[in-house]
Amino acid sequence: MVSDLEPIPAGKVLDFGPAMQVLSPKHRAFVEAYLLLNCEATAAARAVGYVDNGNNSISVQGHRLIHRPDVLAAIREKTLAQIAADVPVYRKALDVIARTPHKDQVKAIGMLLNRGGLPEITEKHISITVALTRQEKEAEIKLMAETLGLDPKLLLGTVTEAEFEDVPEGMEGIW
């Protein structure tokens, strides 16, 4: 029962993380019970001493507790700590699958390699084509030249606008 729980004395080292330490003893007990009772909020609330006054009040209390930000943070903290403690078990299970003909054998091998520091390398090739008109190209060159402090005419040369006609055959050089 919760009444057996005492507040955490200052300076005492516990297996509780920061999120659990800020909870009241009853809320800490609820988090522990919630995780032990397969995440059943009503059963956890009942196990730590909340009373059902009718009208499904204990279910409501359990629901409220699992939606409190401080309780959720403590549940997350405890869950992550448990997962971290169980990593060798998970690795061993993956290792068994990776070494045994199984439908997920290739996937398990990939997961082990990924977690072992050899992640899958994904390559993407992207090709971008930009089509500029002659005027747009000249404008870009002029802008870059000016930005670099260069004379755009030295880069572009001199362009003379003129009209031309074809010279009839045999008349070359007469004009």
Image: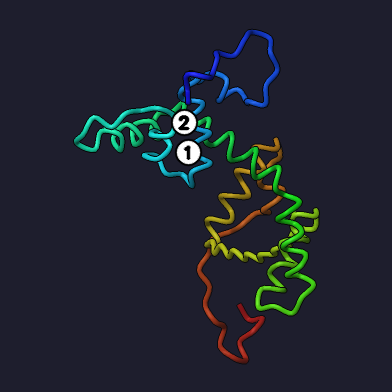
Q: Residue furthest bottom?
A: 170
Residue at image position (56%, 50%) is 139
Do the residues under discs 1 and 2 have CB atoms within 8 angstroms? Answer: yes
Instruction: Using the image, determine if residue 45 lies above or below residue 114.
Output: above
The amino acid type, in three-letter code, at marker 1 is Tyr
Classify mark 2: helix, strand or loop: helix
99 left or right of 167 in image: right
Residue at image position (80%, 53%) is 117
Residue 35 in percent (x, y) is at 52, 40
Q: Residue furthest left?
A: 55
Residue 137 in percent (x, y) is at 58, 56
Q: Which residue is mark 1?
A: 34
Q: Which mark is residue 153?
A: none
Structure colour scheme: rainbow
Instruction: Using the image, determine if residue 164 lies above or below residue 61.
Output: below
Residue 58 in percent (x, y) is at 30, 34
Residue 159 in percent (x, y) is at 61, 57
Residue at image position (72%, 49%) is 87
Q: Which residue is mark 2?
A: 30
Please state which of residues 122 and 105 is positioned toward the viewer in this rendering: 105
128 left or right of 43 in image: right
Please state which of residues 157 and 21 is positioned toward the viewer in this rendering: 21
**Disc 1/disc 2 C-alpha distance (Å):** 6 Å
Please state which of residues 54 and 97 is positioned toward the viewer in this rendering: 54
The amino acid type, in three-letter code, at marker 2 is Phe
Viewport quadrant of the C terminus: bottom right
Badge 1 density bin: few <14, some 14–19, many ≥20, Cα 10 Å:
many
Q: Residue furthest top?
A: 10
